[in-house]
Image (cartoon, grey):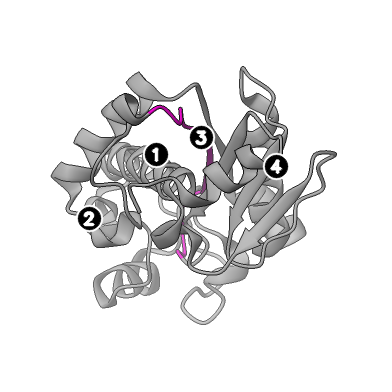
Amino acid sequence: MDELIYERECFSQGFRLVAGVDEVGRGPLAGPVVAAAVILPLEEEKRIFGIDDSKKISPKKREYLAEKIKETALAYAVEEIGEETIDQINILQATRLAMKQAVGKLCAAPDFVLTDGNMTLEISVPQRSIVKGDALVSSIGAASILAKVHRDALMKEYAKRFPYYGFERNMGYGTAEHIKAIRERGICTIHRETFVKKFWDGTRRAQPQNT
């Protein structure tokens, strides 16, 4: 994935600023869905080696690559959509919104957008969806890394406020430990109510330990 094949293909068609977009956090019971958009340079001497689907990379390497991406990218942006909006408009639409807003926050406006999976965004510039794009397209992989590092750091901060759920370990996903805590303590302010109906009695709400 280090060769920017898809980005160079777009460049050969006349597009000069090609953004890759990806998200993390569609499945968790708690926390936001986070999207990132990245425009990578195409010069060989600026190529970042090791970019891949963020799920395939160790946390330490993800953090290293995230810093390299921020240093090297022509533009990057990260966007969060929280639990209230997810509950209101559903996770698919919240994901689309996060990706669209990440694109809109780029300091250099892209003229072509590559997205992971089969996600179509409501944007005015041309776009292409690529299945398994986070493992095939450098800029999408870079976006997945930025989004993952950002969201993991956020969930570790939430773990300090709500220590009962193990957010620093499960990142909001529905592990046995997490589900047990919901059944015993109820939910906290970052839980997605539409995601926890099977585990939550609808009444109890845990309070933060630190504010």
Q: Where residue 84 sits in the image (x, y, percent)?
A: 65, 49
* Residue 83 image position (x, y, % from top left): 59, 51
Q: Amino acid at mark 1?
A: Leu
Quarter of the rendering containing residue 156: top left
Query: Can residue 191 be spotted in the picture?
Result: yes
Residue type (three-letter) at the residue carrying disc 2: Ile
Reading the image, the residue beneath label 4 is 13
Circle 2 sits in a helix, a strand or a loop, which is it? loop
Magenta range is: 28-43
The residue that disc 1 covers is 146
Between 69 and 27, the residue placed more toward the observer is: 69
Residue that carries the numbered disc 2 in the rendered image: 57
Q: Residue at x 30, y 73 (%)?
A: 175
Give how far apart the Cα atoms at labels 4 and 1 are: 27 Å
Quadrant assignment, res 48? top left
Circle 3 is placed at which residue position? 38
> Which numbered disc flags the more N-terminal residue, 2 or 3?
3
Indicate the amino acid at tag 3: Val
Could you give the CA–CA distance between mark 2 and mark 1, rounded to whole angstroms?
A: 12 Å
Q: Of helix, strand and loop, which one carries label 4?
A: loop
